[in-house]
Image (cartoon, rainbow, N blue to C red):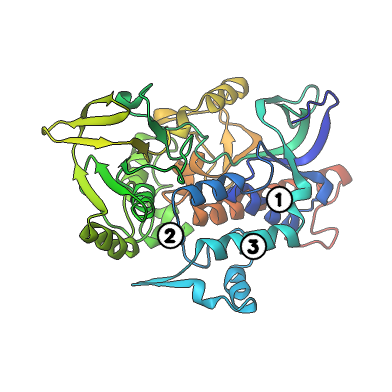
Amino acid sequence: MTTRTSTQRYGCTIVGGGIHGTYLAQRLLEDAPFERSDICILDPHDRLLASFREKASVCGMESLRSTFVHHVGTDPFGLERFAEATDREAELVPTVDYPPRPSLELFVDHAEHVIDRTDLESLHRQAIVDAIDDRPGATGLRLETTAGPIDTDYCVLAIGHGGRLRWPDWATDLEHVDHVWEGFDPDASVDRTIVVGGGITAAQLACALSETQSVALLSRHPLEWAVSEADPPWINWSHIEANLHTLPPGSSDRFDVVSDARHTATVPPYLYEEFADRTDDGALTLTQGAVESATVDDGSVRISLDHGLQLLGDRVVLATGFEPVFEHPFVDRIADELDLARGYRGMPVLDDETLAWQRDDGGVRPLYVSGALALGTVGPYAPNLPGARRAGDRITAAIERDLRRSGADETGTSACDTGVSD
């Protein structure tokens, strides 16, 4: 990444080029009065959705958990139409009591089609954001990045889980242990792998690896089965308003409601048959228990569990997820720099209608939040595809209103006076 010294200027800068950032850029182009040159997507990877593609591939994902109406395009039925146009309707996978889901390949190909059609890569700047502060002598924000400083009228944080991986204490500095999202080679030639985790990633990975080797899936609790990330009503904004926004922003009550509603560490039923077949074949075993100790003996990892059982493997792969994004050092830093309000466990206090991050004094800066950071306002689907669409609705509308109001203030007329209607 090339470092620049001259300050670049944009109308809106999106931090994060994953599913949330990609979707939001399109919404801003379509629904807000921005030119293409006004929008910038900052992401350290070499292309949009790179992190998603890599993670989906390495964990053995074959299809998405979300339905065909949840994708990165702005047309709700765009993926379905893409499947029809390319004669790939068979890749819309049926699910019991749930709408069809796309295969991973279909989803990725459609996402590439959307990115190419709208030339979103031209908006992408490969860079890391180090700091965000008020713009000197003007409204808006200044972003300090590895590509140089950027001044922006509006900024959206769409950073996902922030990339900090969760490592159990027993696994720290132990040889032959990798995290599925870092250092793991799915094609390594080994005979025995221990996969640690109890959610969808662990189950998918265990099934995929068991095609070529013996796999033990170690979970602290019995596997729990759930079709989606949360119950379907949580996709609807009216349900979110009635069940979440009636509670104080940033409160422990909100945190508890969202935590209870999220089907964290669950496995979708469509994996059950494959999981059962692998288990019946003897290629996959499921072990429940807490790790008491772990050692490396003669190049093999030995895990001792609290109930006395021991597991032996050539390697251990952790599918233990991410550390809470609320506690990310980058989040801490910008909250301190901008005097942003935080609630229980560091949850950002957002305006429920706009997703603007509120200041400690109750005011707002032109900083908006999408993704896992918005759990306290968008609800249990916030990190997922439905959450991207719900957040995009609110953020785009808020920026559009503010731009039109600013334009009216500058000209001394209102939108109604000029014949423009919202």
Q: Give residue 369's quadrant in the image.
A: top right
- The 10 Å Cα crowd at callout 3, few under 14, some 14 to 19, many 20 or more, is some
Say if 259 sits above or below 67 in the image.
above
Q: CA distance from mark 3 to mark 1?
A: 20 Å
Q: Give residue 280's quadrant in the image.
A: bottom left
User: Extreme left residue here?
Assistant: 308
| Of the pair 50 and 40, the residue shown nearer to us | 50
User: The disc labelled 3 sits on which kind of residue?
Assistant: Thr
Q: Which residue carries the number 2 mark?
A: 65
Proximity of marks 3 and 1: CB atoms separated by less than 8 Å? no
Q: What residue is shown at x 51% (from left), y 68% (from top)?
A: 68
- Residue 123 in percent (x, y) is at 76, 46
Say if 223 sits above or below 321 in the image.
below
The mark lying in front, picked from 3 and 1, is 3
Element marked by disc 1? helix
| Of the pair 159 and 33, the residue shown nearer to us | 159
- Mark closer to the chain start, 3 or 1: 3
- Mark closer to the chain start, 2 or 3: 2
Q: Which residue carries the number 1 mark?
A: 401
User: The disc labelled 2 sits on which kind of residue?
Assistant: Arg
- Residue 180 in percent (x, y) is at 43, 40
Q: Is residue 218 visible?
A: yes
Q: Is residue 404 visible?
A: no
Q: Is residue 388 left or right of residue 223?
A: right
Q: Give residue 128's quadrant in the image.
A: top right
Element marked by disc 2? loop
Q: Is residue 51 left or right of residue 9?
A: left
| Of the pair 269 and 342, the residue shown nearer to us | 269
- The 10 Å Cα crowd at callout 1, few under 14, some 14 to 19, many 20 or more, is some
- Mark closer to the chain start, 1 or 2: 2
- The 10 Å Cα crowd at callout 2, few under 14, some 14 to 19, many 20 or more, is many
Q: Which residue carries the number 3 mark?
A: 74
